[in-house]
Amino acid sequence: MNFPAAPEITAAAWLNVDVPLSMQALQGNVVMLHAFQMLCPACVSQATPQAAAVAECFAGDDFQLIGLHTVFEHHSVMTPDALRVYAAEFRLQFPIAIDQPAENGPVPVTMAKLGLQGTPSTVLVDRAGNIRFSHFGTLSDMQLGAMVGQLLSM
Amino acid sequence: MNFPAAPEITAAAWLNVDVPLSMQALQGNVVMLHAFQMLCPACVSQATPQAAAVAECFAGDDFQLIGLHTVFEHHSVMTPDALRVYAAEFRLQFPIAIDQPAENGPVPVTMAKLGLQGTPSTVLVDRAGNIRFSHFGTLSDMQLGAMVGQLLSM
Amino acid sequence: MNFPAAPEITAAAWLNVDVPLSMQALQGNVVMLHAFQMLCPACVSQATPQAAAVAECFAGDDFQLIGLHTVFEHHSVMTPDALRVYAAEFRLQFPIAIDQPAENGPVPVTMAKLGLQGTPSTVLVDRAGNIRFSHFGTLSDMQLGAMVGQLLSM
Amino acid sequence: MNFPAAPEITAAAWLNVDVPLSMQALQGNVVMLHAFQMLCPACVSQATPQAAAVAECFAGDDFQLIGLHTVFEHHSVMTPDALRVYAAEFRLQFPIAIDQPAENGPVPVTMAKLGLQGTPSTVLVDRAGNIRFSHFGTLSDMQLGAMVGQLLSM
């Protein structure tokens, strides 16, 4: 079976890192992309705290969580400044890329490259840099833990 | 015992009502003021959903819930437009007053009149229009239900 | 409106008290009867922990919680000895009456006097010793807190 | 690294299966042993519902959950009959072995062979029939999902 290569993240800015992360440089690790919007209820109440819990659960492993702020609606209020306040107040400590706005249309660049349908979305990338799972909506802790565990043991 | 009269709300704008609410006109009802900020984690995850549950629990009673958006920090991103998006996305259906910004200083007018220390805060007003309870922080459903129940039977 | 007087509890034995409680002696207090069975899932997971929380919430008030072990099925395994182990392991600290088995039929005496349909059931008794509320099934913390609060302020 | 072979279960009786399960016959599958007691609070409220969720999460995989009722205290009330009522009332549908009481002492035979310290305990067995993980206490859904996922991909 062939799996598609994960595209690089095209970010307008990064939070919580000194240097932008690159999928290329992360090869050898399992990567989880957590696509969210700061005013998406299922993100705020479920998927974002769960993403932070995944990062904690797999802290000692070859694992990297990357938040991806994919604003595709209400652009005027979910600004980079607003996101910085949100991330600080909600104590998000994982790396977050602000997805690059598109030149035309509401969907930002990386979200389009990944073909995501909305937020929250979860993308799991294997050690070889290929996308093994992409899901729009929420997941149980057990399902998500199982998939990350499986990818780590490959 | 004497209880202080609840001051009128000084609002820059109202959401979810056609006509601004007045404490004077609400006399005869028990009123709960839910002071919150849209980017306050304990509000978003606990106190605001709880406030909505209080409104539902006492829907048939002489009870009125009023949300009060008391922005005292990060004013540039918790704007009225941002609040409207937040309220719509999180499906808040109760009346919300946007507290009037102060001419000087970060604390808005009604928050100052009520002497609130932060968000979330809960203020309970009896049928006579007097403040019986004012609390900064979260409360259990049982405590809050008990206090509203007691005020309703007075 | 007339409310029925709460009957006395007919107990085979009591746990967690030195002297049996009497509804007569408890007049002046609001009394909550928590009818349960030790192998009833909705009791174990919801209603019994909630009953303990009610007792804690109203600890300083004129309030008394009484557990009532109303075994109406599987009598051979929900014995007094089994209940004592259950109460100890689950750290139940409120007074518990073991409802007196009937001479004929599975429904014990106090359960029959109260007309309860199953477990969990909640019966609220006002300060005058009258039944104000009787409910088979679970309740939200807010509803239950509100009702106890209302009865306490009467 | 060498891992110890999982011993066969020595059962006084089985619930929810027509034929006793054997570790030998289950080779090729990942097996999770959930050691519990029906009156152990952390089992009833957390570990047993979680075990059922694991079985559901990995239903299509080479995975087998086995409950192990390891009564090491209060033997007179946690009898096979009482367990049958408990399993029926709490709708436990996975195979359950009633651990064989020891000829001497309170700890039953399989519990002793596995060296378990109490309930709840979780034992994970790989496809080759070797014990990879043994834990006394509770686990998060994410941790447990991750470990089962890892073992399934080996």
Image: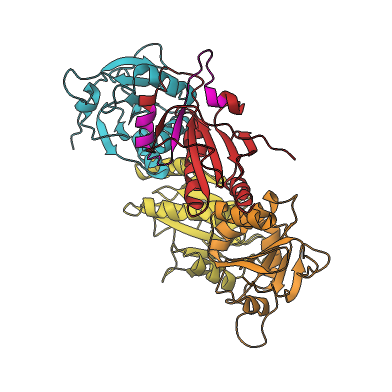
Chain colours: A orange, B yellow, C cyan, D red
Residue drawn at (63%, 75%) of the image = A114
Q: Position of residue C48 (x, y in %)?
A: 41, 32
Q: Quadrant of the C terminus of chain B?
A: top left
* D94 magenta-colored: yes
Whether residue B40 is visible here, answered yes or no, is no
Range of residues picked out in magenta:
D83-111
Q: Nearest the camera: B42 or D131?
A: D131
Q: Nearest the camera: C24 or D53?
A: D53
Residue drawn at (51%, 21%) of the image = D72
- Tell me if residue D85 comes above or below residue B20 in the rendering: above
Quadrant of res C33: top left
* D53 magenta-colored: no
Q: Residue furthest bottom?
A: A104
- Tell me if residue B86 comes above or below residue D22 in the rendering: below
Q: Residue furthest left?
A: C104
Q: Nearest the camera: A25 or B61?
A: A25
